[in-house]
């Protein structure tokens, strides 16, 4: 039931608690009204007491005077009790007693049936209904009791001739109608007073809640940890600041400052107000403020328009995001820059390249992309540790920065690879900068008590001359870089379309080689080696051949690119060794003596950990002794990365019982110190020195010198490419131990080796 619901009959509140509250609040007014009522009752009845002396000598005199005295006395007593009343209940009890006694007393007085008595019969109930502050129930009881007393006193007890003709029935009906009318008036009066009181209560409640809300808002405004500023919308002058704003801004007297004084860029406030115009609020306005002490802070502003006594104002919250922006900058830098060198990383480089490439098309000079690869970084890491490699990388980054011009972009793409985007730059400018870089990279880098020597290979591509797409431009520069490394490193190569065609051929070749490995189409062919002194077959060299489905049998020269790729080189070597071991086992089981089989190892295979142990395990699984194998390597193995690792691997091969043969001796850049440093059991004279040794004195001298060198170092010498008997006789006369070439047999498949050995055995017999 609602607290302020009214009874339709009484007009009072249905809820007792609400009614009690109403009466308690009205108590002072009720007491004042009761006091006046009793006071005037005393005065009026005292005056009537004087007029009652007119009944002297009449029997009614002895009724009127005592009754009047009782009314006066009870009025005086109740007046005193009313003054002492503290609750509505006490007041109602006093008034109830007064109404009852007065009704009886006046009922006796109207028994005179005078004209005045008839008037009193009507007035007393009217007064009790309308004047006495009482509850509806008490009013109803008092009014009914009073009317009854009046009716009885006037009609039943009354004597003498009345001033007007009347009857008991008529008077009773009149009194009933009067009571009903008065009850309706009381009900309406109750409703009106309570509705008025309810409105006042609700207004009080609203004002109290408003005051509470205002107090809470002011408290929140003052204590909220976010700086809050109230400013004039027109001129920006501060109207109020909370404690956090005063602390943040360092301002005590807010009235002396305006928001315009704080913007680093005063145009930001105009933009702020313009954005406010549409929705009368704004969120997340990013700007920079300068505090009175000069400290500049990045902030986000959120504001709403408010009205202060008809004055347009703004309530703005200020969120300091300086630290957040700094953290975001650190995160962004970590995500877009290399931690070691501080250069932009691949992600940042790619974005910069796309932006520069888009502009380069309309630039007369265009742009250039340099891909720079440090030569020998792995060797430095392996030999001196990663600290030395890091020092080399940091020095290279600094030299790239020094070479860069304003507007150029330098980045580390990862590992030992850097990039430089030159914009604007034509071919001549780019080549000049690249040449300077090559020279700078050759300068030694101090590292502790050592000096590190760094070199670089550079690939150059031009935009838009070569490509306009950033992705294709990177491919072009990468192809040029690859060509520089393949050409001996420490040089610059400018991209040209032929490089892409070569790359596409290489990709196609590698794909076909992979398919050939899966189809077991790469197989060993065997070329016999013969002792020149006896003509006996001492072994074979296993040579890779590709049984191409369209081009027939291909020699390694047709797929040499595969041996430069570690993945393919290792796969080919694995395939060849497995087949060689199986063939050896089959020949031995057939009772043949194939001698030792020379197996070629690509330089890339020496990057495999524990290569010698792995090969020994392969042979063991096939049941072949390691002493049946010669490990053939070229001089490039010694010159490649990780020389210490190569030496350890060769010694492991030798310790397992395999011999080490140095192939193509004299054609590369090997020093004679390699023969001393590395474990070499055999050297092979390259066919280029054997082919013309009969006609060319220089070739003859070189072949003789190599044979003499082998004898001095106690290293066996084998001559390759022997095709004539005269060549064989020359070599035998100089002391060459072995020879191989078409004179003794062309490379043959494994099945043909059986027939070859059997034929040689029959010839020897």
Image (cartoon, grey):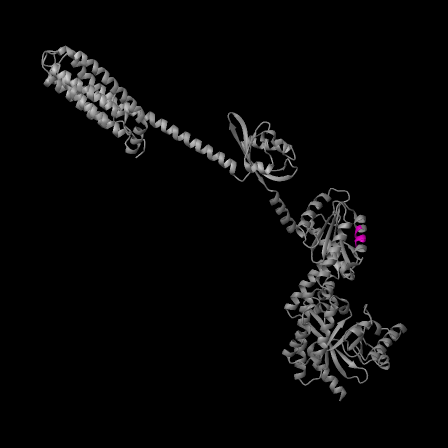
Magenta span contains residue 603: no
Quarter of the figure with the C terminus: bottom right
Q: Vertical placement of 710 versus 189: above or below? A: below
Residue 86 lies left or right of residue 450; in this view the side is left
Q: Is residue 338 left or right of residue 233?
A: right
The quadrant in which residue 389 appears is: bottom right
Quadrant where the N terminus lies? top left
Q: How many numbered discs, if any?
A: 0
Is residue 368 found left or right of 154 in the rendered image?
right
- Report the residue that reaches farthest toward the bottom: 765
| Whole-percent x, y for residue 693 in the image | 87, 74
318 up-or-down from 633: above or below: above
Magenta region: which residues? 433-437
Q: Position of residue 373 (x, y in %)?
A: 74, 57
- Residue pictured at 65% horizontal, 39% vertical: 295
Q: Quadrant of residue 752?
A: bottom right
Closest to the observer, 684 or 52: 52
Residue that appears at 64% across and 76% down: 617
**Residue 521 drawn at (x, y percent):** 66, 70
Name above or below for residue 379 compared with residue 680: above
User: In this view of the protein, can residue 741 be seen by the observer?
Assistant: no
**SS assignment for the magenta stretch, majority:** helix
Q: In the image as oriented, which residue stretches furthest toward the right? A: 697
User: 604 or 416, which lies in front?
Assistant: 416
**Residue 608 visible, this orientation:** yes
């Amino acid at each position: 039931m609602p607290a302020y619901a009214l009874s339709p009959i009484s007009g009072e509140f249905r809820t007792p608690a609400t009614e009690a509250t109403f009466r308690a609040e009205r108590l002072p007014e009720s007491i004042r009204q009761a006091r006046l009522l009793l006071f005037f009752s005393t005065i009026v009845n005292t005056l009537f007491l004087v007029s009652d002396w007119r009944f002297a000598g009449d029997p009614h005199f002895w009724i009127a005077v005592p009754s009047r005295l009782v009314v006066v006395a009870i009025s005086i007593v109740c007046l005193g009790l009313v003054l002492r009343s503290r609750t509505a209940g006490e007041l109602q009890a006093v008034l109830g007693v007064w109404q009852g006694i007065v009704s009886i007393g006046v009922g006796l007085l109207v028994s005179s049936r005078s004209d005045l008595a008839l008037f009193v019969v009507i007035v007393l109930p009217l007064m009790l209904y309308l004047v006495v502050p009482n509850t509806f129930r008490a009013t109803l009881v008092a009014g009914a009791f009073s009317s009854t007393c009046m009716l009885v006193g006037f009609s039943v007890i009354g004597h003498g001739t009345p001033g007007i003709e009347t009857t008991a029935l008529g008077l009773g009906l009149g009194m009933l109608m009067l009571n009903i009318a008065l009850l309706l008036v009381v009900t309406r009066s109750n409703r009106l007073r309570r509705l008025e009181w309810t409105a006042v209560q609700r207004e009080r409640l609203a004002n109290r809640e408003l005051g509470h809300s205002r107090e809470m808002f002011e408290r929140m405004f003052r204590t909220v940890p976010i700086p809050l500023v109230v400013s004039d919308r027109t001129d920006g002058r501060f109207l109020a600041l909370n404690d956090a704003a005063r602390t943040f801004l360092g301002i005590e007297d807010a009235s002396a400052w305006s928001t315009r004084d704080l913007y680093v860029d005063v145009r930001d406030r105009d933009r702020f107000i313009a954005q406010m115009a549409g929705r009368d609020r704004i969120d997340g306005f990013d700007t920079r403020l300068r505090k009175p002490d000069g400290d500049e802070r990045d902030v986000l502003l959120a504001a709403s328009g408010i009205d202060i006594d008809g004055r347009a104002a703004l309530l703005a919250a200020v969120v300091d995001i300086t630290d957040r922006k700094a953290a975001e900058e650190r995160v962004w830098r970590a995500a877009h820059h290399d931690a070691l060198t501080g250069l932009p990383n691949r992600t940042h480089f790619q974005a910069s390249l796309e932006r520069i490439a888009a502009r380069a098309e309309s630039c007369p000079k265009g742009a250039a992309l340099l891909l720079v690869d440090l030569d020998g970084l792995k060797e430095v890491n392996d030999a001196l540790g990663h600290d030395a490699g890091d020092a080399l990388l940091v020095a290279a980054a600094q030299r790239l920065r020094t070479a860069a011009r304003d507007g150029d972009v330098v980045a580390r793409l990862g590992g030992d690879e850097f990039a430089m985007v030159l914009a604007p730059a034509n071919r001549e400018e780019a080549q000049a900068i690249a040449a300077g870089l090559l020279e700078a990279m050759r300068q030694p880098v101090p590292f502790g008590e050592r000096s590190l020597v760094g070199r670089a290979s550079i690939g150059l591509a031009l935009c838009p001359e070569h490509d306009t797409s950033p992705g294709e431009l990177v491919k072009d520069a990468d192809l040029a870089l690859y060509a520089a490394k393949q050409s001996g490193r420490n040089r610059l190569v400018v991209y040209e379309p032929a490089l892409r065609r070569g790359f596409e051929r290489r990709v196609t070749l590698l794909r076909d080689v992979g398919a050939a490995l899966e189809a077991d189409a790469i197989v060993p062919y065997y070329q016999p080696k013969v002792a020149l002194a006896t003509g006996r077959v001492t072994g074979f060299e296993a040579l890779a051949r590709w049984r191409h489905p369209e081009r027939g049998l291909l020699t390694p020269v047709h797929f040499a690119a595969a041996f430069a790729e570690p993945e393919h080189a290792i796969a080919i070597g694995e395939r060849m060794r497995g087949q060689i071991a199986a063939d050896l086992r089959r020949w031995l089981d057939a009772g043949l003596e194939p001698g030792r089989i020379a197996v070629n190892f690509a330089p890339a295979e020496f990057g495999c950990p524990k290569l010698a142990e792995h090969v020994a395990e392969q042979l063991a699984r096939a049941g072949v002794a390691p002493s049946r194998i010669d490990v053939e390597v070229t001089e490039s193995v010694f010159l490649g990365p990780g020389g210490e690792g190569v030496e350890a691997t060769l010694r492991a091969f030798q310790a397992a019982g395999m011999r080490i043969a140095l192939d193509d001796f004299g054609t590369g850049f090997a020093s004679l110190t390699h023969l001393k440093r590395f474990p070499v059991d055999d050297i092979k004279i390259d066919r280029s020195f054997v082919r013309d040794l009969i006609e060319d004195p220089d070739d003859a001298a070189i072949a003789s010198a190599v044979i003499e060198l082998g004898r001095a170092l106690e290293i066996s010498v084998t001559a390759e490419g022997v095709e004539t008997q005269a060549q064989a006789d020359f070599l035998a006369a100089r002391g060459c131990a072995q020879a191989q070439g078409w004179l003794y047999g062309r490379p043959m498949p494994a099945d043909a080796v059986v027939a070859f050995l059997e034929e040689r055995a029959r010839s020897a017999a």
